[in-house]
Amino acid sequence: MIRLEGVTKEFDGGVIALSDINLELREGEVVVLKGVSGSGKSTILALIAGLSKPTQGRVIVDGKEVSKLPDHFCATFRRENVGIIFQRYNLIPDLSVSDNILLPLYPANMPKEILLERLEKELKAYHIEDKKDAVVKNLSGGQQQRVAIARANVNNPKIILADEPTANLDEKLSREFIEILKELKSQKRTIIVATHDPLFFELDFVDRFITIAHGKIVDDNT
Amino acid sequence: MITPEILTITILDILFFLFGSIGFVIAVKIVLFYDASATTHRQYTLEKQSYLSATIIKFLLLFKTLSFLFFIYTLNKLSNFLPGAMCAAGVVNALKIGTPLLLLKILNLYIFAFWIVLHNEDLEYEKQPYLKVKFLFYIFAYFLLLSEIVLELNYFYLLDSSSVVDCCGSIFSTTDGSYMAYLLSLDFSYQLGAFYLLFVVMVFFYLLKNRYLFALANLLFVIVSLITLISFFGTYIYELPTHHCPFCLLQSDYNYIGYFLYLFLFLGTFNGISLGLLAFEKERQKKKYISALIFNTLYLLCVSYFPLAYYIKNGMWL
Amino acid sequence: MTLFFLSSTISYELSQKVKNMPDITLTQMRAGREAFVKEAMVDAVLEIEGVTHAYTYIKAPYRFKDDTLFEVVGVDPFESFYDPFINTLLEQNTLESGSMLISKDVAEKLLKAYYTKDFNFITPSGELKNLKIAATFATEQKPQYRWLVLMSKEDAREVFALQADEATTLAVDVANKLEVPLVANKLQELYPNAKVVTKKEQQLTYENIFNFQSGTFLTLFSVTLMTFFIILYDKLSGVSSEEKREIGILKAIGWRIEDVLSAKFYEAFFIAVFAYLSGLVLAYLFVFYAKAPLLGNIFLHDILLRSEQFVLEPHIEFFYLFLVFLLVVPLYFAAVIIPSWRVATLDADEVMR
């Protein structure tokens, strides 16, 4: 499903974020990338999403060589296959909940009925129907987190990437989030979580733990 | 002669020149160094810059179209200042470079519009098969743009109000020895025959689905359309057998019918000609055929309406 | 924008004025000053082929005691006059010898000097010439008639102490407008000393006065443009980190560079069009309601003011709206292109860090 072949990523300043990573992830797997911040786990997520390009090597997702795709197609690929949950929710604070959720679909020129249908589904799934016209910046952290998940899920992605999803949540909300992940797994999505939150390390539904340090894979246990 | 109009055109030309040049530099770099398989910093920069030049070219087309309209307006307006001129035709002919300038402007509209079509087609495929071609093509277009700008500025700054010019009546008259007079003195039934025949031939090529012949028919159709518009259809729009001018059509006295006619003709033949230049994907090719036919038909109906309406009203031809 | 409203309105007023002029006007010159034309010239002029109508009239300022200049026009009441306004006045009122038609404003002036039924003009020789006020008329907001005093030619001659066969101006109408220059030439040959002005020439003179003014305002114009550029540069050179983050998010969730760019251009388009429209409205109010303080003075030069007075009646030329549009909107877009492209192509992976 996802394959990284000899991937090296060097940033403009000469900092090497990843060196010679080889990795293969199967469809429907839930993978946790462990490591301290700056170890390169976020960079792996960015490469899989096609948000950045490797300096060397290839990234192949669902048979597509994402690392060679022109930006135009990369974006379309993301829109159709990938949902991302960010560390700080990364919602647009001045827009309403509905607009934030539908944001990934706007450029696709879908008919309005389909948009509304998708929106209703997500609002219901994450219990935020009553907030649908509220402006995001007025919501609580937990509510914002749910909006962010709804947005990541609205395009029915095959792959969900989560980058430090619980860094800003208290324990109760973190556990809530983990429940949602479990639910997503049951929908047969491939999920990759990059985190250093110990809460994730003892979960039974996670298929693989991969530890990253200094841009290299140091441990990979299933 | 510095008037606000000419100043505006100058400012726009400077703008076009600056941005056209940025696009040009990028285009040259892309043609030389673009390598889709490379993962270097330079390659990523070039990929990003290709978006900049595409944006610039869209910008150029949009405002060049508007400035083209403005150019025609300005000519119409200047005709008030130049002794002898009645409409834009006289002003264009005030200087030798007037006619080449006008033709170049029209050509450039076709060229830039075609660039956009090429660009859109290119973005439909992951391999971007036309990437280098489109930037090479832009380099060519850039030189046309440059010559247009140079010619235009020359034109306006050489123009002075003391130059006595002809009104459209004498430019498009049938008596003097110019090539225009030669065209107009020909029996227009041949020209009309060619006009309608070409249209039929075009439809025929559409049915054959031969895009090269279809494009060729469209190219000829533009030329014959303009000739017949001047020699025959124009006179019915003006309801005056001696009035042949293709510019007066644009004035309010004739309900701005000229703008519609030229727009239809442009859209129809542009789509038609671009079919011959590029192998479009099937669905889009079909769309282009259809819109070429629709707009050409609209043009044909519009121009044919005037003589027919005249005949029905007056029971005779001009 | 303001400039173009003003200028198009003024040139429209001028062209309206010229439109009503006779095809050719002829005045005699003597010692560099305008002298009088003779009644006998009319017959000679009518001999010229193509001339349909020729007549003389008297038009001269009369200085009222508070330095107001009345415009005295002396005409033949039974002949049609080139000015449609005066023509209507003559049709509606009977102008007998010894009486006159005066405008409302003139009537008020006279009232202040306790003249209600008649008025004593003081002729150059110091005698008094008494004329009855036959009627007063409204000037319909047209300032060129504000101080009009209409009387018969004979009375006007007495007021200005002209000889019985003298008048100030000879007006000539020509049947075929294409023959106007030809007739003008013949007139000039006939009266080498006279000043012969055709309608077209009059129009060009007005336009030249106006173009001469253009030079003055070109400076103003470039200053405006410069300011505009500076504002643009200032506004657009800095992209906030907040905006960078938002665009990063949009790209991460599947927006293409083109999508970001087109969103940016919609935004730019709305700003530019909004600025354009509000400029238009403000300029309109400034010129036609506030009567263009300061700026108006630049345009309404003395040369024009002395003989013609203006009320700025709204006249907007579409052409100038288009011109200003082409100056504002492409410039704005041009200033937006590169900053927008910069943001749109930022590496979106930054939002992941």
Image: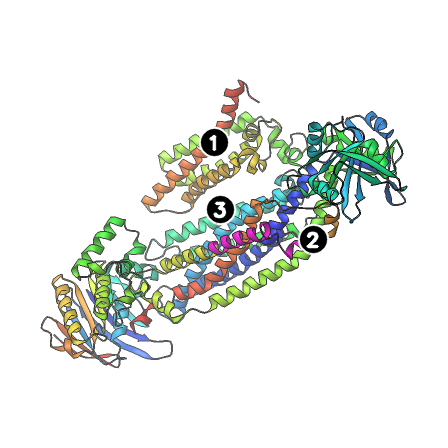
Name the front one of labels 1 and 3: 1
B188 or C179, which lies in front?
Answer: C179
Name the front one of labels 2 and 3: 2
Three-letter residue code for mark 1: Cys
Q: Is residue B60 left or right of residue C34?
A: left
Range of magenta residues: C273-298
Real-space Cα separation, disc 2 to disc 3, in angstroms: 40 Å
For label 1, the SS is helix
For disc 3, the marked residue is: B110
Q: Is residue C340 left or right of residue A202?
A: right
Residue C268, image quadrant: bottom left
Q: Main secondary structure of the magenta part?
A: helix
Three-letter residue code for mark 2: Gln
What chain does mark 1 sit on? B
What chain does mark 3 sit on? B
Q: Is residue C146 left or right of residue A108?
A: right
For disc 1, the marked residue is: B302
Real-space Cα separation, disc 1 to disc 3, in angstroms: 22 Å
